[in-house]
Every structure is written in C-alpha cells, then in structure tokens.
Image (cartoon, grey):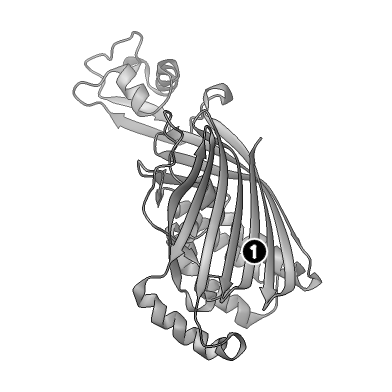
Amino acid sequence: MEIIKYKIQVGDTLHSIAEKFDRPVNELLDFHNSQAVLTQQINSEYIPIHIDVILINAKYEKPESERDITAYKIISKNEYFNFKKLVYSTQNSIEIEIEKLDDNKYFVSQKSKLIECSSPHYDSYLVLLSLLDQPFEDIILITDDFGTIKKIENQKEIKEKWHLVQKGLSEVTDDKEMLNRIIRDGETVYTDSLPHIMANLQYNLLYPGKFNSDNAKINEGNSTRLYSSLFSGSKILLKFKNKIIEKNNNKITVENKSFLEKANVEILRELYNATFRDLLGNNFNYDFSLISHYNIKDNRIDSCNADFIENINDTIVAKSRYEINKM
C-alpha cells in the first residue's frame, strides 16, 4: 500500500488537509487511524499538538457519485487521395471518459477503440497502430485558463508503457528496418508527448477552449501546431487558431484557420517543386482547415461535428469527418 506521510504545517486543519488532497475529512481520519499507532491517532475534529505527520492513502479514489466524469463517443471517417483518386478510407470509433480533477486538470481514459480500413493491406498496420496507441490510453492533461493543453502530468507513466510496447513490436512484423525506424521516431513521441497530443485532431476538438457560462463563447487560446499529411516526412508543422464565425444560443461554429510559419514556406515550396511541381504546376497554394460545429450544454461539449480538409492547388490530399457525442 502506497502511503503519503504529510508533515503538518502551521495553520493546517483536518479540513484544509482533506481539501488539499481532494477527499472527505472522514476518509482522511479513518485511513490515518487505521495505519497509525494508538498514541498517534486522532479522535476529534482537532489535530493534537503532539502529532506532526498525517498518513494519507495515495491510491484513494472518489466514489463514482462524487466524480465529475463526461463520456464521449468519437467517430472519425477518413479518406486519403492520390491526386483526386481515392486510395483508401478508414473509420475509427472510440469511447472515452474525461474526468475533471480540478479547474485545469483532466484525466482522459480510452474505454474502447475500433479501427476499420478499406484496404486489406493495412491489417498488420492497424494492429501496429493500436499497439502504439496503448501508452496514451490514460493521460492526465493540464490546461491554462483559456483551455489550451499545456502539460501532460503523467509523462513518466507514458514513457514506461512505451518501453513495454517496444517488447511487443517484434511480434507484429519481421521488418527489422521498419521496427528500428518506429523505435527511433517513437522516442520523442513517448518521452516528450505534449507536441504529439497538440498535433492530434481528437484532442484539439475536445479542448478548443473553455466555454463561458454567460455567452457560451469559446475563448481563444494560443496557437496550436498540427502535422501536415502531405509533408509529414519533412516534419513541417502548421499553426492553428480558433475563430468563432457563427454563434446562436448554444450552437457555435468554430473555424480553425491554418497559416504557415515564414521559416517553413520556402522549405515547403522546395519540397513541392521537387515532388509535385510537374504534376500540379508552378503555383504553390496550400490550405489546411478545420470547421467545427459545437452544441454546448451546461458549459460543456454536448456534441460536435467537424470537417477537416487538406488540399494543395485545389487538389484534395485528405478529408476527414469527426462526430463527437456525449454518451
């Protein structure tokens, strides 16, 4: 059993300590008394002067009735094109729970996940994808006051799960070169996961900003970086900013309009000239946009439909439809 030995500070009371560790006073007292010797037990609402340490259950979980949990089902339908010709499509169905631990801390847990793909050649790839997603099945996110994700609190746990996943990778494929590349590229994803989470459309849809109780407005946060499918090999990042383009009662339409950093424009142009210029012409006109339609209830997302399109010179590269519904 994991026990926290909390050293009592000047001004502490049983109520203030219970509040600090987010649990009822009775639970705090019962656990301390069950672990402490007789002379160190507390039998009133006051802490005896001679006691300087309180024993706290590190694994305490709130009863279900006291926890602030919202469950969602997320369906994403994705289509990938090779110059206007549909190459393959996928559909992901995920059920998640988001527990609000405090004003800026959320525990996100995947309860189920189903991945389908139209191409029979992607069976082993989908198994691999599911395996690589396991370290992110339970994460704790810290946001700022605008709702922007700023930190992953259980980063150490994700890294430990990644080490376990590595052991199972060899059972998925015998391609040593691919395995070495996955492990090499995965090191930064699983040891410093914040950029990966910030580049995930699912999290960007669930955390567009906080909803103001007076006017159900999504407050604009910092720019968000998302990876481009077309130039993924170059690891070029895009910036996004939320902009409300329509608001009617609890229905809000949010446009996430991308723009390229100046330092990336010439790099992308060089990649375009080397790879796509002969096929698509001299012009370089790249667009990456996401339009989201939210229904808000009690200051939370009740449902969301979002359309994502990435295109270059009016030629669609990828198209996705996200459907999020509270369960």
Image height check: is 249 above or below 258? above
* Residue 191 visible, this orientation: no
Q: Nearer the viewer, residue 70 or 179?
A: 70
Under mark 1, the amino acid is Lys
The relative height of residue 82 versus residue 29 in the rendered view (above or below) is below
| Residue identified by numbered label 1 | 319
Q: Secondary structure at mark 1?
A: strand
- In this rendering, the answer to whether 119 lies above or below 17 is below
Tell which of 251 and 234 is nearer to you. 251
Determine the residue positioned at 60% across, 51% down: 306
173 on left or right of 158: right
Q: Is residue 97 visible?
A: yes
Please name whichever residue, 49 or 13, is drawn nearer the observer in this view of the structure.
Answer: 13
210, above or below 90, in the image: above
Q: Quadrant of the C terminus?
A: top right
Question: In which quadrant of the rendered view does residue 317 lie?
Answer: bottom right
Residue 21, x across and y down, in percent? 38, 29
- Of 44 and 97, nearer the camera is 97
Residue 115 drawn at (x, y percent): 72, 57
Q: Residue furthest right?
A: 120
Residue visible at 68% across and 61% down in the picture: 78
Circle 1 Cα neighbour tier, 10 Å, few/some/many (<14 / 14–19 / ≥20): some
Residue 194, percent across and down? 43, 57
As drawn, which residue projects farthest toward the top? 44
Q: How many marks?
A: 1
Identity of the residue furthest to the left in this view: 10
